[in-house]
Image (cartoon, rainbow, N blue to C red):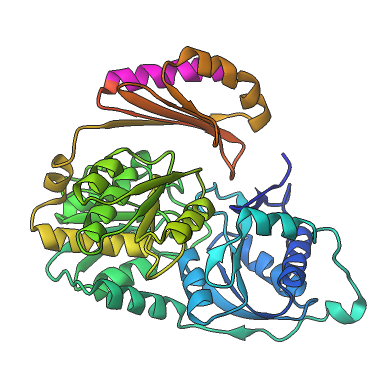
Amino acid sequence: MPLMFSVSGLRGIVGKDLTPEIIASYAQAFGRFIGSGTVLVGRDTRRSSPEFLKAVKLGLGQTPCTMVDLGIVPTPTVLFMVRMLRSRAGIVITASHNPAQWNALKFIMAGGRFLNKKELEKFKDRIGRTKKTPELLRPKPVRKKTDAIRRHIDRILKTIRVRAPGLVVAVDAVNGAGSKALPQLIRSMGCRVFEVNCAYSPRFPRGPEPVPENLYQLSHLVRVKRCDLGVACDPDCDRVSFVDEKGEPIGEDMSVVLAADYVLGTIRGPVVANLSTTRLLDHVCEKHDCALFRTPVGEAHVVEKMQKVKAVFGGEGNGGIIDPRINLTRDALVGTAFALALLVQRKVPLSTIIASYPSHHMVKVKIRMSGDRFLKKAGRVRAMLKGRVTTRDGLLVKGRDFWVHVRPSQTEPLVRIIGESSDAERIKDIVHKIQRILS
């Protein structure tokens, strides 16, 4: 398959689509695109990431830019540092939730946000125009900065100002970039922490996405250690999901609902979420009398809308939580702090908080197929479903008692089907029929 290059970054399978030479050329093009200044670079724990770090260093070394290596850090930590230090740009070497054989570059602009669509098109114009001369192939010196995680955590604690002494928390960081940062944050809030899969390693011991079917080890740890909360993130620690005190995964969409409920109880204002995020968020926004805006999937779209409407909170249904006071990106550390703050505020178990929301059932399915193939079959899906149709991001259909969103992924050669209804059998049947059409 060809490289995938979008606002979500440059992604591919290592050694097949993505090589050090390609990484170096894109890093060089990015350096020439931004012109000059300091570029902060962080990475995850994938096997190819150290080699790709050298390639980024080589590519940036052929531009007027100066590189600062932050080491292994969560993706949101890199964006936070770009914003805090007023750096010119940043690069993260990570394929986020993709399988271990993948890797990627994520490109960050000044102010600590990812490229938007207009910037992406201008950047693409630079690709292929890179120069290689013997004198420029000598790498420039690179500075290292080792306090990024501490600074990020300090800002979260100063912003949220809630401690949770006495709570017992289990953490599963899939041996990724959040393996040190996530337990460190939770301990800083006064909690007792039990860890599983929290050692930096290129081996992911479970599926990288923090979805319920991947959290069996965390659920077991919560039950055995009688924890109040289980916390899981993806390999670059920008998505978070939770397990309740009974060891039951509550689904990554609920991370956004819980965070929004806490934030809007302290600060009122507009909220932005993508089209695939649970409609329980509508319930929370109505409860707090706050406006909710929807965007296409992709945090760049959410952040751009947040800035336009001056939102106080944003999120995506994959467990991505955005607090603009701290970061203009999805941040699993921030989401975890909000969940703990909500438990302290409500003084009841997480399962009780979840039960207080209206009943809902979500179904999420992935089908391996190209975007072009999906477009050929989208008309049949649309004809089968009765309801109001939106086509600004794949196909979204809202019926009387359901909604379903079918769209090609920006990060993998997949089509995602996400549906929700108060009737579990109804939404299962709808999604199954869509699967049959697409398959």
| Residue 378 is a magenta residue | no
Please tell me which residue is depicted at 24% across the width and 58% down the height of the picture.
Answer: 264
Residue reaching furthest to the right: 133
Residue occupying the point 66% across, 69% down: 53
Q: Quadrant of residue 341?
A: bottom left
36 and 46: which one is in front? 36
Q: Residue at x 77, y 65 (%)?
A: 29
Image location (x, y in percent) of residue 429: 37, 16
Residue 377 in the image: state x and y as whole percent. Answer: 61, 19
Magenta span covers which residues?
A: 425-439
Which quadrant does the C terminus fall into? top right
List x then y, in percent, for residue 411: 58, 45
Q: State the residue in front, 388 or 86.
A: 388
Q: Nearer the viewer, residue 56 or 100?
A: 56
Q: Horizontally, is 429 left or right of 37 in the view? A: left
Residue at position x 50%, y 75% in the image: 83
**Residue 183: quadrant of the picture:** bottom left
Q: Is any atom of residue 149 visible in this view?
A: yes
Q: Is 333 placed above or below 203 here?
A: below
Q: Is residue 414 left or right of residue 282?
A: right
Q: Name the quadrant containing residue 31.
A: bottom right
Residue 119: where, in percent of width, then height?
67, 59
